[in-house]
Amino acid sequence: MPNVKISAATDIVSLNSSDMFPVARSGSSTPYHATAAEISSFASVTVSAGAYGNVGRNLLHNALARVQQRGAGPFAAAGYGLDRWETLLGSGDTVSIIAAAISDAQRTQIGDEAAVWSLYNTFTGAAAAGSYVLIAQRIEGVRRLAGKTVTVSFWAIAGSGTPKLGVSIDQVFGTGGSPTAPVLGNGQAVTLSTTFTRYTLTFAIASSSGMTLGSNGNDCTQLNFWYSSGSTNATRSGNVGVQAAAIGLWGIQLEIGSAATPLEKLEPRIDAENCQRFYCAGTGTWSFYASAASQNAFFTVPFSVIMRATPTVAVTGSGGGAWSVVTGYTAEPDNFVIEATSSAAASPVYFNYSYTASADL
């Protein structure tokens, strides 16, 4: 039979049972042919999800806790610590979050040599009804996961005892204008041990049909890990209760579907760039000629990646000569401009600077 291009379902009806097709067996370099009739009798094969390592299954960033642009901690207040993970606290609750080195024994428990750092939280929950301790990551674009079933998987370990860890997912429709109020999901909890264990939880996320997004472009799906909770957030936290413990997390994955697939481990450069879309930091040196004091100069500093939105930039001058003021002047998603002021006539005026730029959700 001559070569035939099959480009539509209707072409199939033209095939004869004796028509031949080239096929190959996995692991064999020897090709052979089979008829259409033979192919129709082949047993069906189920391929495990994720077997091909398709990039993008995991919708979370910094799943391995290895991106640490703000440092390795300890972080003892509400706000961002390890990249993309924000700590949220109620009144009277305390935390100490670090990037903790994973030991060889713990790597054996996990069964993966890629396990190097865990997000480790030593916390004390307050007893008030409205108190809570959680960390969250916000996935931009609430409609990406709306109406879908998703699976959250992670390895976790307790420093001692058997504390609970709750997981929930919220839909946040952003700010600006008159957006729909957030839809707060009910939580599920697991009970931990002093051995690193992988846990899997499945959630059905509500549709966004009929919801109104804010005008500021910051709508998102928010994944929460609950360490402690008073009665006000009992349902959201999975009824973890008020706790004081130490818990480590590694290999956190959120993916579409009702089953957990093997952990996706991005190449380190891509992992870092994903985080730098939301927050980045850097240092540099600039110089210019000034014929007198109080002369201004402007320098453009490009970001290594285009950020999610126009960031908030903070610039600090440190060292140099003949300058008096250095500030961030204007910012765009791909760069910002430094303004420096000379303190005297000099050739050159030079200054060292550091900066942070945040477009976190």
Image (cartoon, rainbow, N blue to C red):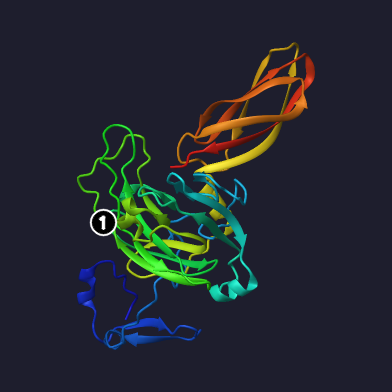
**Farthest front residue in view:** 127
Q: Quadrant of residue 17?
A: bottom left
Q: Residue at x 79, y 17 (%)?
A: 346
In the displayed structure image, the side of residue 51 where residue 188 appears, left or right: left
Q: Nearer the viewer, residue 295 or 125?
A: 125
Total number of numbered labels? 1
Q: Position of residue 330 (x, y in %)?
A: 53, 26
Given residues 94 and 358, the one toward you in this image is 94
Q: Is residue 185 above or below residue 152?
A: above
Report the amino acid beneath label 1.
Answer: Gly
Q: Can you give x and y, in whole percent of width and height, for residue 216 in the image?
A: 36, 35
Left or right for 123, reference 142: right
Query: Image quadrant for the N terminus?
Result: bottom left
Residue projecting furthest to the top: 292
The answer to which quarter of the image holds residue 260 is bottom left
Q: Is residue 108 left or right of residue 227?
A: right
Q: Secondary structure at mark 1?
A: loop
User: Observer-nearest residue: 260 or 186?
Assistant: 186
Q: Is residue 191 visible?
A: yes
User: Which residue is painted at 51% across and 49% down in the image?
Assistant: 94
**In the figure, residue 23 lies in which quadrant?**
bottom left
Q: Which residue is mark 1?
A: 147
Label 1 neighbour load within 10 Å: few <14, some 14-19, many 20+: few
Relative horizontal placement of residue 308, taking residue 1 as reference (left or right): right
Residue 283, percent from left and from top:
67, 37
Location of residue 299 in the rendering, given as x and y in whole percent from the top left corner? 63, 26
Q: Is residue 269 above or below residue 297?
A: below
Note whether residue 226 is visible: no
217 above or below 228?
above
Q: Nearer the viewer, residue 197 or 17?
A: 197
The residue under the point 60% across, 41% down is: 281
Q: Is residue 347 above or below residue 67?
A: above
